[in-house]
Image (cartoon, rainbow, N blue to C red):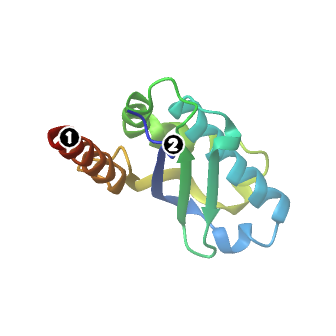
Amino acid sequence: QQSKSQEAGVAMRVQNVDFGRLSSDLGLLYAVKAAVRKAIAMEAGVLDRDVVVTVFPPSDNVQASVALGRAADPKASLARLRGALADAVEAEVEAVAGVAEVCAGPVEVTDLQFEGQFAEGPSLADEEDEEDQEDQEDQEDQE
């Protein structure tokens, strides 16, 4: 039984990009966010619009929320994200025209973290499904 909201959270540091300087050029900031969005969507097998990217200038912390509801296999999507996301984000960000102006070296993605329904361990949605199933079993026992 699939939950209606299948989301994964992704947090990372995108190092060697000066987000303080980047934030003074909104067009370039938007392009970098779009590059991160594209990389995540590509790896997850979802549309760009299923990914919301947030940056926190001047910090190099980047967070994203990924709606996996359209993915053919959400668990496989998360596994792909865990496997190749850092390389994909680095390549997409480095390909942004003008980004070299705000970089102190090669773009490097570190401290990748994942959370959400398909991270390891039970989620609230899983617990609710189990409770619903137990309630249904109790009703059947009473009949």
- Dot 1 or dot 2: first in sequence order is 2
Residue reaching furthest to the front: 143
- Rendering coords of residue 101 (x, y %): 74, 58
Write down the residue under mark 1: 137
Q: Is residue 111 left or right of residue 101?
A: left
Residue placed most toward the observer, 100 or 38: 38
Label 1 sits on a secondary structure element that is helix
Residue placed most toward the observer, 74 or 63: 74
Q: Which mark is residue 4?
A: 2
Label 2 sits on a secondary structure element that is loop
- Rendering coords of residue 39 (x, y %): 59, 38
Q: Which mark is residue 79?
A: none
Q: Quadrant of the C terminus?
A: top left
Residue drawn at point x = 82 percent, y = 65 percent: 26
Picture quadrant of residue 53:
bottom right
- Rendering coords of residue 56 (x, y %): 60, 72
- Rendering coords of residue 55 (x, y %): 62, 65
Above or below residue 141? Residue 115 is: below
Residue reaching furthest to the top: 72
Picture quadrant of residue 22:
bottom right
Choose mark 1 or mark 2, whichever is in front: 1
Q: Is residue 117 left or right of residue 29?
A: left
Name the residue type under label 2.
Lys
* Disc 1 to disc 2, C-alpha distance: 23 Å
Above or below residue 43? Residue 28 is: below
Does the image show residue 45?
A: yes
Residue drawn at point x = 46 percent, y = 58 percent: 11
